[in-house]
Image (cartoon, rainbow, N blue to C red):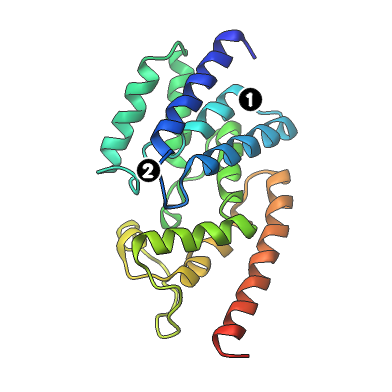
């Protein structure tokens, strides 16, 4: 990695810390940091461009509509920051493409086109699984005032983007509507290996949760 690339990554880290520093929804700086570490590890294992993977990972939640007035406002914030950095146009557009495609969005986004995109998407999805994924799910639900569990409210299926974002939901249903689906949507061999273990941990947690909910 060149000195200029290292400087861009340092600036991206400072920017991401500023954007996510006060977040209380599970999209905080530690989440970004974990995804960046996972992306670096996967990039090495999969032979992807480390700079593009690292930059996209650090910036991936900047335009998230959950954290901005609108998706458009978040995208403009990201583009404005990238415009001020010494990166090639091709790199800039590659990073924007990755970030614009990687969200789950109820399963409606198209598959990742590039190797780097598949790496960063896997890194983000891995942080939604396992023990950390469980913790983040309940943090997010609490921040939005969602119920922890409601047996009378079944998990939703075949949702539109709008229904996925704004329909009635619970923390436990989120596992069935998204998180338990991620294992079979991983892109890379190493991502799939790591997802298997984290997926099983969530299954064990949900089994125990329901038994305790029922007083067993």
Counting the numbered discs, the total is: 2
How dense is the environment of label 2, judged by Cα within 10 Å: few (below 14), some, or many (20 and up)?
A: some
Q: Is residue 170 above or below residue 193?
A: below
Q: Residue at x 47, y 71 (%)?
A: 173
Q: Quadrant of the N terminus?
A: top right
Q: Examine the image and state in which quarter residue 83 appears.
A: top left
Looking at the image, do the residues carrying marks 1 and 2 touch, with CB atoms under 8 Å apart? Answer: no
Q: Is residue 211 above or below residue 29?
A: below
Question: With 147 as the anchor, is 205 left or right in this view?
Answer: right
Disc 1 or 2, which lies upstream in sequence?
A: 1
Extreme residue in the front direction: 22
Say which of 38 and 10 sits in front: 10
Q: Where does the image place residue 136, in percent across and percent down from the top left? A: 52, 56
Instruction: State the mark number for residue 50.
Output: 1
State the SS at label 2. loop
- Please give the residue where the numbered disc 2 appears in the rendered image: 64
Front-most of 211 and 176?
Answer: 211
SS type, badge 1? helix
Instruction: State the mark number for residue 182.
Output: none
Residue 118 visible in image:
no
Foreground: 97 or 140? 140
């Amino acid at each position: 990695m060149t000195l200029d690339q290292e400087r861009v990554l340092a600036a991206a880290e400072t920017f991401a810390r500023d954007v996510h520093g006060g977040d209380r929804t599970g999209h905080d700086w530690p989440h970004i940091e974990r995804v960046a570490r996972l992306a670096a590890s996967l990039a090495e294992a999969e032979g992807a461009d480390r700079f593009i993977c690292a930059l996209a990972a650090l910036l991936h939640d900047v335009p998230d509509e959950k954290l901005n007035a609108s998706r458009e406002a978040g995208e403009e914030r990201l583009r404005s920051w990238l415009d001020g950095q010494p990166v090639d146009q091709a790199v800039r557009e590659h990073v924007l493409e990755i970030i614009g495609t990687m969200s789950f969005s109820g399963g409606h986004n198209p598959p990742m086109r590039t190797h780097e995109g598949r790496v960063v998407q896997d890194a983000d999805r891995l942080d939604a699984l396992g023990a950390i994924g469980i913790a983040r799910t309940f943090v997010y639900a609490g921040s939005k005032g969602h119920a922890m569990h409601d047996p009378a409210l079944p998990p939703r299926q075949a949702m539109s983007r709008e229904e996925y974002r704004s329909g009635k939901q619970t923390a436990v249903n989120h596992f069935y509507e998204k998180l338990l689906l991620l294992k079979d949507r991983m892109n890379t061999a190493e991502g799939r290996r790591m997802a298997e273990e984290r997926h099983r941990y969530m299954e064990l947690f949900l089994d125990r949760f329901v038994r305790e909910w029922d007083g067993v």
